[in-house]
Every structure is written in C-alpha cells, then in structure tokens.
Amino acid sequence: MPSRYPGASSFSYSFGPGPLGPAVKALIIANVAAFVVTSFAPVVEVRGALTPRDVFEHFAIWQPVTYMFLHGGIFHILFNMLMLWMFGVELERMWGTRYFTKYYFVAGLGAAATQMLIGLIPSAFGNQFYYGGTIGASGAIFGLLLAYALYFPNRQILFMFVFPLPAKVFVAILGGIALVSQIRGEAGGVAHMAHLGGLLAGYLFLKSGRIHPVSEIKYRFLKWRINRMRRKFDVYSGGRADDVNRRVH
C-alpha cells in the first residue's frame, strides 16, 4: 500500500497473518524439534504415538499429548505447520497467548479422546483404533480451523490453494470429507475421526461460555463501526500538507 509518511518508501507490502505470537512460535519449534529427533530415533515416535491399547493397558498416559508433536513425513509436518501459522497467528493475537494455548490443547486432547473412546467399541471397527497408532497435530489444527470459521466466517480461503471459499464453507467441506471418508472406510492412513474430534472439542469449548463467538463477532463489528464513525469527525489543524502531525482528534 502507498505510504503516507514523507521520506518513506513509496510502497510497502505485507504477507500472511503477521508476526508469530509466543504460543504459535513455541508450537512450531516444538513440532520441528520432535520431527528432527524422530528422524534419528524412530523409537521416540513409537513410544509417543497415541495407541489406545498402550494408554489403557500399559498406562502410557503421555501419549494423548505427545502424539500432537509427531509427524510421519516432511509434507505432513509442513502442511500442519502451515495451517498453524495461517490460522493460529490471528487467533492468538485476538484471544491472547494463554487462552489460545488452552484452546489448542483442548482440541488436540479432544481428538485423542475420540480415538480412544472409539477404540473401546467391541468390534473390528473399534479394534483398528484400539491397536493402531495416531500421530500429528491435525486434531488441534482442525479445532483452530473451526474457531477461525466462527470468528471470520466470510474470510476468503483458497481451497486446495486454488479455489477461493468463505472460511465457513471451507471448514464445512473439510469436516464433510472427514466424515464421509470415515463412514465409507476410506481412511487411507488419515485419522479422520481425530479430525472430527478436534472440531467437536473446539466447538464445545467455545460454547462453554468462556468466550462466545457470536458475541465476540458483534463486539468487533461494533468497534469497527465506531472507529469508522470517528474518522468522519476528524479535525484538521492548519499547517503544511506534508506535516505528519497535522491531524488532531
């Protein structure tokens, strides 16, 4: 955009949601560090992956947390960290680091709880969850996607990095794909139920009354209108046109 200050560059550009907040930065660093460690020590991934059998029978109570920091390949971690950056930065800036961190882990733990509860179903369907391992931050990321869609429903997001869609439609499509894929048994190595669990946990947490998305949206819209009206009543003092301090409110 053009600069309004004398002596500054004629144009400035910005890309992405802005600088990383403390929580998003720490999460990215932790995920990348864990990926590097597991590349040299695969046993860490085996012990840290979420396997309901290990949790229930061998008391591996750390797995519902550690699985969120493990990834199966370079594209897996790149995609999840890209989503964390794209949607997490603005949510952390709006909520604050403490609430954002709490929400992130609630969504991730909700995804883990979904995997474990389904694993208790006495059937072949339940057994694949009970004995199978799950890794990745996707459950927590899906929780962030849901929150972003609730707060910014009409923000444009490039679906498959090509087609622009409102955030609410984007998240609805992702949730629908996860649900249909799970029902049809087309998991393909993807923990679709964990994704749905992250969505549900995030939704229930936001609806718990601690922060009400609709009220927050109304508040921010009203604040925007007030600021817009205020600009209409700006008073300009005399002086040179290039004086950057000429505006008086």
Image (cartoon, rainbow, N blue to C red):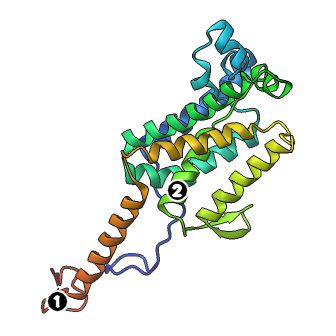
* Quarter containing the C terminus: bottom left
Question: What is the three-letter code of the residue carrying label 2?
Answer: Tyr
**Would you name the residue on which mark 2 appears?**
148
Q: Secondary structure at mark 1?
A: strand
Q: Are marks 1 and 2 in contact (CB under 8 Å)?
A: no
Crowd rating for badge 2 (residues with CA inside 10 Å; few <14, some 14–19, many 20+) = many
Q: Position of residue 100 (x, y in %)?
A: 43, 43
Depicted 140 relative to depicted 46: above or below? below
- Tell me which residue sits at (68%, 44%) in the image: 78
C-alpha gap between disc 1 and disc 2? 39 Å
Depicted 6 relative to depicted 48: above or below? below
Q: Nearer the viewer, residue 84 or 112?
A: 112
**Would you name the residue on which mark 1 appears?**
236
Q: Nearer the viewer, residue 107 or 15?
A: 107
Residue 50: quadrant of the picture: top right
Q: Position of residue 93 (x, y in %)?
A: 40, 52
Residue 176: quadrant of the picture: bottom right
Question: What is the three-letter code of the residue carrying label 1?
Answer: Tyr
Residue 215: quadrant of the picture: bottom left
Depicted 216 relative to depicted 97: above or below? below
- Tell me which residue sits at (62%, 12%) in the image: 60
Crowd rating for badge 1 (residues with CA inside 10 Å; few <14, some 14–19, many 20+) = few
